[in-house]
Each structure stands twice: as C-alpha cells, then as structure tokens.
Image: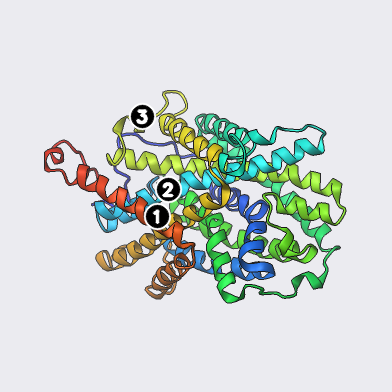
Amino acid sequence: MDLLKPAEKQKLVKSLSAFDLFLLGVGAIIGSGIFVLTGVAAAREAGPALSISFVFAGIVCLFTAFSYAEFSSVIHSAGSAYTYAYKMIGRFAGWITGWCLILAYLLTGAVVSIGWSAYMVDLLHALGILFPSKFAHAPSEGGIMNVPAMGIVFLMSLLLSKGAKESAWFNHFIVGLKLLVILLFIFIASRHIDPANWTPFMPFGWKGVMGGAAFIFFAYLGFDAVSTAAEEAKNPGKALPIGIIGSLIFCTFLYILVGLLLTGIVSYKMLDVKDPVAFALMQVGEHLAASIVSVGALGGITSALLVNMYGQSRIFFAMSRDRFLPSFLEKLHPKFNTPYRIILGSGFIMALLSGFTPIQTVAELTNVGALTAFIMVSVSVLVMRKKYPELVAPFRAPGMPWTGILSIVSCFFLIVHLNKIVLMAFVGWLFIGFVMYLCYWENPLDKRKRNLRL
C-alpha cells in the first residue's frame, strides 16, 4: 500500500495554499457555532460557563487535530478521516467512519443553513419586510418548510460546482467580513457587560459544562473539512498542518471571548434563540450594531456552509472512488473539474433536511457522528505508528501515544454527555450502516465485481 498516493482515476486540481487552507478552516469553524448555537448552549446546557465548555471542546479538538495534521502530511487524499481509517485499519473501519461522516456533514450543513435562515428573516424584518413565518420554520416548529434555508443550500451547491479556487476566493472575502463583525461585537459588548449576568457562573454544574461542550462540538468540525482539501493543496505536507492546527487555535480563542461577552451583556436564560448575538445587542439598545452583526452573521454562516459542503463533497468523492458509493458519482465536470454530481446530489438531500427538521435535533446528531469519526482518526494514527515505524512524516503529532489516547477518551467522554435519545438514534444509524456493509461489501457474489483501490 502506498500511503503517499491517493489511488484514483479522477484527480483534483492542486490550487490551494497554506493561507487558503487556514481561511478555509476559519470559514468552517466560525459560523453557526458563534452566531447560532452559543445561545442555545448557554440557555439549556452551560449558562455563563459556556466559555469553559469552549475551552474543553477546543482541547479535545486539539488532541484530535494533531492526529489529523500528521495524517494529512502523509496521506494526500480527499477522504479525510474516512481515508485514514480505510488505509490503516481496513475497509470495514473505513466504511463505518465514512458512514459517520455522511451523517455529520449532511446534518452540519442543515444546522448551518437553518441558522442562516433565522438571521436572514430577522434582517428582512429590520428592513420592514415581513417574511411569512410558516415558510421559515420546519413542520415540528409550527411551519410548513424553511424556504430560506433550502435556498442558500442550493446556491452554495452551484458555487461549489464552479471549482475549489473560485470558492476559496469567495471564502476569503466572507471570512474577512465576519471577523470584522466579530470584532465589532467584542468592542460594543465590552461596554455593556453586567457582572451580575455571570452569577451563578455554573447554574447547571459541571454536568452542564460538559453537556455544553458536547452540544457545541459540531462547530469544530471545520478542521476536518481542511483535511479534505489534501488533494487540492499545493504543498500538503506543510500547508495542511498549518491550516488545521492554526485555524483551530485561532477560532477557539474567539469562541471563548464571544461566549464570555454574550453571557455578560444579557442573562443566559434569554439566549434560547437562533440569532443570539444580534438578539443580545438588541437587548442593550444597540440596534444599528445588531443589524450590522446580522449582515456579518449571514456572511459568516454562508462561508461555514460553503466549507462544510466542500468537505462533504470531497469525502463522498473519495468514497465513490473506492466503490463505497455508486461509481458514477465520482465523475468530474468536463470544464470545472469538480465532482458536480456529488455536490448537487448531496446538496439536494441537505436542503430537504434543512427545510423540514428542527435545529436542536439536527445539531446533536451531528456531534455524535463527528465525535465517532474523530475517535477513528486517533485510533488510526496509533495504528500507523505501529505498522509503519519507519515512516517519515513532515509533521509528527507531539506526545504520542498519549495524545491519541487522550483524544479517544475525551471524545468518548463527550459522547456519553449527549442526549440519550440522540445516542439511540445514532446506534440505529450505525446498525443501518452495518447491514449495508454485510449485504453489499461482504456479499460473495459481488466481491468479484468490486475494484478496491487502496
């Protein structure tokens, strides 16, 4: 097995620099995590101690990010965690990891687009345009369908079909916009802090803090999306570790700061809304700033959706090449050289999810899928160290094997703090994946027809 070569017939164009990858990570990580789920997590899980939840989630991700960085510096393939598990442990591990990523990416996109819809409706309302409520909410929320959420998914699908470099330039612009908006929020919110809002600081105890970390964990899925760009990176051995670890540390710092300020200007009890940052500014009389933040949030959430859909399409592309998904999906566009069939097909499924499902249920299912995939990555890097001790990697994860072990334990710790109903639903998802594997991959009549290309 040649670890250094992605075994494929269809090749993606190398066009992304280390700076592109860093901003790709920032674009994915800074999105709904700050602009949408901070409020829900504070109100229902952690209270003002949400900042500690971000610290813990960031540390867990850093352990895993080291494993990602080492793998991505060696295996330059679009499949991310799926490819790492497939090459190191075997096809069943690869399939299960890919199956978890299918769940995580599709649902993450749905969460992000639902958050985008909430900010868009609020912005239209501020401009005097009343958008019909029944067309901005899922049926379980009293509506018919979330039309804005579905619309933004379709638009991002069309943009991604044009190419990675074109999408990266759009992402650069949007990332710059949302960072300016976050700085504006930090500046204004720091003038309205009421320390009384931080009392009690941990109203739900340490259980709430860990529950908050588990709930907002999906926001960090962005660094996985960076690793999916391995085939399109100009110098993947150096650029990918910079993009993965750099974007994670930078974004974690912003999350902690925004979490503290958000719960410092209004009571955490008031933040159970889909647009907490703009809502909090409205509560302290900063109406103009709230409108500006809504515009920036729309841009920030848009870039997060763009990068999520980009990563998702590259993982599905890799799975299609390995025949875990139908082979016709791997076909590239003759002009743009993008896996357009995967982009448009997965975009259609994501649009249905965002149009008809509530945000909290979708977010929690996303987290358990992502955490399971992260565990598989950490196990895989430990296996790689054992199987290929002579392998020279451009980036070596520090503190191995303890870093990998801590990643596995901490991810599992967050999983057990998720809602039990969500965990049962995830077990059902795994069971479906296991049945599919047995019926197709282990069917002796089909083995001769398959072309596994490791």
How many C-alpha atoms fall within 10 Å of the one at disc 3: few (<14), some, or many (≥20)?
A: some
Say what amino acid the circle numbered 1 marks. Answer: Phe
In the rendered picture of this protein, how many numbered marks are placed on residues? 3
Which residue does the numbered mark 1 point to in the structure image?
426
Specify the label residue 58 is tagged with. Answer: none
Amino acid carrying mark 3 in the image:
Lys
Mark 3 = which residue? 331
Q: Are marks 3 and 2 in contact (CB under 8 Å)?
A: no
C-beta proximity under 8 Å, tags 3 and 1: no
* Residue hosting label 2: 103
Q: Residue 412: x, y in percent?
A: 42, 68
Of 349 and 319, nearer the camera is 349
Residue 234 visible: no
In this picture, residue 378 sits left or right of residue 171: left
Could you say where residue 309 lies in the image, as x and y percent from the top left?
Answer: 50, 41
Q: Are marks 1 and 2 in contact (CB under 8 Å)?
A: yes
Question: Is residue 405 among the parts visible in the rendering?
Answer: yes
Up/down of 434 relative to 70, above or below: above
Name the residue rendered at 41%, 72% in the picture: 409
Dot 2 alpha-carbon crowd within 10 angstroms: few under 14, some 14 to 19, many 20 or more: many
Q: Is residue 443 left or right of residue 32?
A: left
Q: In the rendered view, tell whether residue 5 sits above or below residue 155.
A: below
Real-space CA distance between mark 3 and mark 1, rounded to the nearest whole angstrom? 31 Å
| Residue 38 versus residue 56 in the image, above or below | above
Residue located at (24% from left, 55% from top): 90
